[in-house]
Structure formats: C-alpha cells, structure tokens
Image: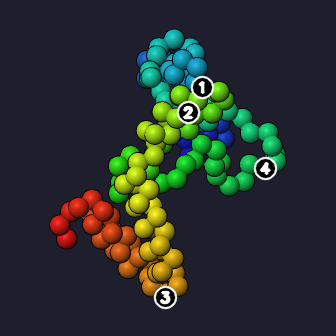
Amino acid sequence: LTPEYLKRVGVLEEVCPDCKSKNSIFSDEISGTRVCKACGTVHEVNIIDETSEWRNFEGGSSSGADMNRVGGPVNTNLDNCGISATITGTTDARLITSNNRISSNAKDKNKLKGWSIIKELCRDIHVSKQVQQDAIDLFSKVEDNEKL
C-alpha cells in the first residue's frame, strides 16, 4: 500500500514538516517531485514513476499481470545471456544480414540444440528438474571447453 493510497482512503494523514499543513503534499508524476501545495516546499525530487507508460485497451480486463514487454529469462550459459534484438521494418538486406550474423552465434546454437535434446531425454525417462539442470550445466561446461 502506497502512502498516496492510504492518504486517499483516509488512513494516513500527511503533514508538511515546514508549514504543518495537513494533507497538502502531492506527487507530481510529470516532474517527479513531491511538493506541499500550501507553502511550495519541494520534499522529494527525482521520484521514479513505476507505472506503465502505455495503456491497454484490448480485452478490458485488468486481472493478472500485464505481460507486455516480458521476454524470456536471462541465460548466463549463453554468450549473449540469451538477449538479442530483431530488426524489422526495413528492406536493407545488408542491415538484416549483419544483424543475423551478429545475433547467431554457432556456439550458442549448439548449446540450445544440446539443451533441447537433454530436456527431451530427461522428460522421456522422468528425471527431476534438478537432474535435468545438472545435465545442462555439465553439457555447457563441455561446450565451453571447461574442465569438469
């Protein structure tokens, strides 16, 4: 529960430490400040707005987490941690080819293929997720030419 919510429902009463006015401090999300309306004292600056900067209209349901902009998990076993960018909306073949060349690392492709095989085998013989993860970690070390 945020202080703004508690204040709005009447549970929290905020008092300006300078002029002692009650409930006169407001948050200005645009400038990122908290200011007293009565005396003008700026109490906080550089407040980070943690709300989304877009609105969702489709579906009209606000239940559950908004999964916009959520990608896959970072994978430290890959050279680029599994993070990449895709260039679209251009007809420049050189740009697309360069991006594909940068994004496609043969070593990472081999790891992903090996992981896929390991996961499939582990699923088929019904082993635990921990055993599966240990097998993936060992395979990754071998691919990275590390000593076991």
Pair 2/4: label in front: 2
Circle 2/circle 4 CB separation < 8 Å: no
Q: What residue sits 74% from the left and 39% below the top?
A: 56
Residue type at tag 3: Ile
Residue sitting at x 60%, y 25%:
92
For mark 3, what is the residue? 125
- Between 80 and 91, the residue placed more toward the observer is 91
Assign a secondary structure to mark 2. Answer: helix
- Between the residue at mark 2 and the residue at mark 4, the CA separation in whole angstroms equals 37 Å
Q: Which mark is residue 96?
A: 2
Measured Cα–Cα span from mark 2 to mark 1: 6 Å
Question: Residue sitting at 56 percent across and 38 percent down?
Answer: 86
> In the figure, 145 relative to 117: above or below?
above
Please provide percent x and percent y for residue 111: 40, 61
| Residue 110 appears left or right of 22 | left
Q: Secondary structure at mark 4?
A: loop
On the image, numbered disc 4 is attached to which residue?
Answer: 61
Q: Check the image and report above or below for 46 versus 148.
A: above
Circle nearer the viewer, 4 or 1: 1
Task: Inspect the image, locate mark 2, and give the three-letter code of the amino acid beneath it.
Answer: Ile
Mark 4: which amino acid? Ser
Residue occupied by mark 1: 92
Counting from the top left corner in percent of width and height, residue 30 is at 58, 20
Tell me whether circle 2 and circle 1 mark residues in contact (CB < 8 Å). Answer: yes
Viewer-proximal residue, 105 or 58?
Answer: 105
Q: Is residue 25 visible?
A: no
Mark with earlier residue (4, 3): 4
- The local secondary structure at tag 3 comes to loop
Say few, some or many: other residues with alpha carbon within 10 Å of mark 1 (under 14 / 14 to 19 / 20 or more): few
Within 10 angstroms of label 3, few (less than 14), some, or many (20 or more) residues?
Answer: few
Q: Amino acid at mark 1?
A: Asp
Residue 65: x percent and y percent?
A: 64, 52
